[in-house]
Image (tube, rainbow, N blue to C red):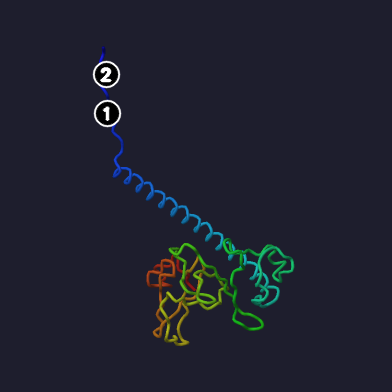
């Protein structure tokens, strides 16, 4: 009779199985977070594009009417031909997540002299995000007419002292737009992180990029 040697088969221990499951769980969480972050960035890119599209239409409206549209004319979004901003914009963009119109505000006069459009970016690490701006202080991104005042968010440094009227206006870049920079009582630019690559000198001729000189 030929004897056969039995081979012992060793499997995973409970501890090893738990470690494998934990590693797989961590990888899954990382994957989901990365996917969500890319979704957020995609949604935010759409929001910025939408605001830019609306801004162009609103500027065209102002050229023909010598006033910016009132908030009541911008209260809806979609393709309804009854929307007052038509025909300047045939398809008024809605927020890609909420499907609601983007908040729009003016100086409040009958013939508005400036406007601001707001959105809430999902990627809070976006360098153009300004926490706590707009209606209800719940938005963090805006586009506006060139003469619109800069909204100061709840996450920004306040400006309790108004600068004297003799100050020379200074400019910085927010969201690839040249905007007027707030000045302190000594006419110094109050550079904040919201100004792209401000470097503490918002209009230095020796360091103009990407600041805007005027």
Q: Is residue 195 above or below residue 19?
A: below
Q: Which residue is drawn at 42% across and 85% down?
A: 160
Q: Any mark on residue 207, and which? A: none
Residue 18 coordinates in the image, percent (x, y): 32, 46
In this rendering, position of residue 36 left or right of residue 82 = left
Seen as rendered, the residue at the extreme right is: 82
Q: In this view of the protein, which residue sits in the foreground, 73 or 165?
A: 73
In this rendering, position of residue 13 left or right of residue 211 = left
Q: Mark 1 points at which residue?
A: 8
Residue 110 coordinates in the image, percent (x, y): 66, 83
Q: Residues within 10 Å of mark 1 (few under 14, many from 20)?
A: few
Total number of numbered labels?
Answer: 2
Element on which disc 2 rests: loop
Residue 37 coordinates in the image, percent (x, y): 46, 56
Q: Name the residue under label 2.
A: 4
Q: Quadrant of the N terminus?
A: top left
Q: Image quarter for residue 147? A: bottom right
Q: Residue at x 41, y 73 (%)?
A: 192
């Amino acid at each position: 009779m030929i004897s056969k040697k039995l081979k012992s088969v060793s499997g995973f221990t409970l501890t090893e199985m738990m470690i494998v499951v934990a590693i797989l769980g961590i990888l899954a969480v990382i994957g989901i977070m990365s996917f969500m972050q890319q979704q957020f960035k995609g949604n935010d890119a759409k929001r910025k594009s939408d605001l830019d599209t609306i801004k162009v239409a609103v500027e065209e409206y102002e050229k023909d009417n010598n006033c910016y549209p009132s908030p009541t004319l911008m209260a809806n979004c979609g393709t309804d031909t009854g929307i007052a901003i038509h025909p300047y914009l045939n398809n008024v963009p809605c927020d890609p997540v909420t499907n609601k119109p983007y908040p729009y505000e003016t100086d409040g006069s009958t013939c508005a002299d400036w406007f601001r459009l707001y959105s809430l970016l999902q990627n809070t690490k976006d360098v153009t995000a300004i926490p706590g701006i707009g209606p209800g202080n719940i938005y963090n991104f805006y586009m506006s007419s060139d003469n619109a005042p800069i909204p100061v968010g709840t996450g920004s440094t306040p400006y309790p002292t108004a600068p004297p009227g003799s100050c020379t206006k200074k400019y910085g870049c927010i969201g690839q737009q040249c905007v007027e920079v707030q000045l302190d009582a000594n006419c110094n630019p109050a550079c904040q992180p919201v100004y792209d690559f401000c470097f503490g000198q918002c209009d230095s001729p020796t360091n103009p990029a990407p600041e805007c000189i005027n």
